[in-house]
Image: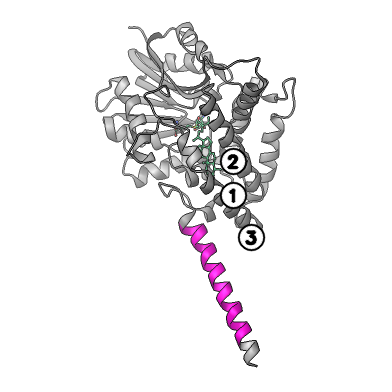
């Protein structure tokens, strides 16, 4: 009898310890810097729970077919695929990164959150807009940059994203931040924007136009909706002057980045200003914000490696318990792999996510 009592005590204590540890891991530890999402809330965006695996399989098969092993070449299919991608990753991004879906140079003695904010404020400072101006956020995600920019500049920001789920998330965050009167979010394709000609006093895009199969299409649309004399700034994902298209290692890194980030093909830094000019913009300034003295943007990814693997354990357990949708394990694994390729892109210097271009629509 005594033996059974002891066995029961050991069993109960172990269960409590493991159960408590798991809850701590999942509910407290495993949350985003800005606590937008918790692990137990991970969803497939607008996809029904049972369609997440199918969505992932469809997404990944796009990168396995076609002449370059990449069906993303057929550009008419890209916006729909990008939409599926953001259904799959939006919650994981919010949970493990925050509400701003971009990189920023690390700033010594400043938190990631401050470094992110400073990078966003720099964009609107370049636009030179007055409080109350109407400006456009091209590819706004869940609106992290939009809220910073509205609060910092006093401008009214209209954001556009192709993903319905992001619209829902962005609107909820805007309301919670008390910025919904200054921030509007529209669901639409930035290659065909539902806005009038000459209707904005400024525009910016942060790590979003890389999803456009033809950059001239999105730049052309931005040019159309801007008022003459106003500015557009973009942080572009590009290959740098160090990229050698004959080096198989470079090719592998760039393909890895494209596959894990829904990109139809990374452009060279050389193409950006040419395309801006082609659609009618004057190019005022162009520089890679990742260049020294800026500190590496990829340190945050590298330093997060242990947390990312911990997240993988959490996601796997939640999916086994059927709390997280089936398919989330594959999506999370894809992100683990892409994080490594991005860090390699940073280490080798062949890739930058912050090639900045400042343009003006002539008077
Ligand atoms: C501009 C784009 C997105 C840039 C970044 C915001 C994201 C690129 C890779 C993402 C991540 C990789 C690893 C994830 C990790 C495994 C997970 O546990 C927590 C989230 C990650 C850190 C995730 C966060 C966002 C990124 C850094 C592209 C799409 C054009
Ligand atoms: C990496 S996220 C960046 C989001 C935001 N700029 C930020 O920094 O948080 C890219 C964004 O571009 C949007 N996007 C991609 N292709 C698009 C398209 N064709 N039309 C509209 N939005 C698009 C995505 O939906 C997503 O919101």
Residue at horizontal 68 percent and vertical 45 percent from the top:
53
Could you tell me how far apart the alpha carbons at marks 3 and 2 are, in whole angstroms?
21 Å
Relative to 320, residue 122 above or below: above
| Element on which disc 2 rests | helix
Secondary structure category for the residue under label 1? helix
The label shown at residue 249 is: none
Task: Classify mark 2 as within 8 Å of ligand 1 or not, answering yes or no.
Answer: yes
Residue that badge 2 annotates:
336
Query: Relative to 339, is 223 on the left or the right?
Result: left
Q: Nearer the viewer, residue 257 or 36?
A: 257
First along the sequence among labels 3 and 2? 3
Tell me if residue 330 can be seen.
yes
Residue 348 in which image quadrant? top right
- For marks 1 and 2, give the CA distance: 8 Å
Task: Residue 85: give x, y in percent of width and height.
Answer: 59, 36
**Relative to the observer, which residue lies in front, 224 or 111?**
111
Q: Position of residue 308 (x, y in %)?
A: 54, 46
Between disc 3 and disc 2, the foreground one is 2
**Relative vertical location of residue 304 with respect to residue 285 in this rendering, above or below:** below
Q: Which residue is mark 1?
A: 312
Residue at screen point 65% across, 89% down: 3
Q: Residues within 10 Å of mark 3 (few under 14, many from 20)?
A: few
- Magenta span of residues: 6-28
């Amino acid at each position: 009898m005594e033996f059974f009592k002891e066995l029961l005590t050991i069993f109960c204590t172990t269960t409590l310890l493991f159960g408590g540890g798991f809850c701590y891991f999942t509910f407290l530890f495993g949350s985003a810097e800005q606590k937008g999402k918790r692990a137990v809330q991970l969803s497939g965006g607008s996809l029904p729970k049972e369609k997440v695996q199918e969505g992932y399989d469809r997404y990944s098969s796009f990168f396995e077919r076609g002449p370059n092993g990449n069906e993303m070449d057929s550009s008419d299919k890209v916006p729909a695929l990008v939409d599926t991608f953001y259904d799959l990753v939006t919650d994981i991004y919010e949970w493990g990164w925050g509400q701003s879906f971009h990189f920023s140079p690390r700033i010594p003695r400043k938190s990631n959150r401050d470094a992110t904010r400073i990078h966003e404020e720099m964009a609107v400072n370049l636009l030179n807009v007055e409080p109350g101006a109407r400006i456009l956020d091209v590819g706004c995600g869940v609106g992290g940059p939009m809220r910073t920019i509205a609060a910092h500049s006093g401008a009214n920001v209209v954001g556009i994203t192709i993903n319905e789920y992001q619209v829902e998330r962005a609107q909820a965050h805007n309301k919670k931040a008390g910025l919904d009167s200054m921030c509007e979010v529209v669901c639409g394709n930035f290659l065909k924007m539902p806005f009038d000609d000459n209707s904005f006093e400024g525009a910016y895009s942060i790590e979003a136009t890389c999803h456009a199969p033809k950059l001239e299409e999105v730049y052309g649309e931005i040019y159309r909706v801007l008022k003459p004399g106003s500015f557009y700034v973009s942080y572009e994902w590009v290959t740098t002057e160090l990229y050698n298209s004959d080096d198989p290692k470079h090719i592998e890194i760039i393909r890895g980045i494209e596959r894990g980030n829904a990109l139809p093909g990374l452009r060279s830094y050389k193409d950006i200003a040419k395309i801006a000019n082609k659609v009618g913009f004057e190019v005022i300034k162009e520089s890679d914000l990742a260049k020294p003295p800026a500190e590496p943007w990829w340190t945050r990814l590298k330093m997060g490696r242990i947390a990312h693997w911990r997240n993988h354990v959490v996601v796997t357990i939640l999916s086994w318990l059927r709390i997280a949708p089936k398919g989330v394990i594959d999506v999370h694994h894809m992100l683990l792999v892409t994080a490594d390729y991005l860090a390699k892109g940073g280490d080798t210097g062949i890739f930058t996510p912050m090639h900045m271009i400042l343009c003006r629509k002539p008077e």
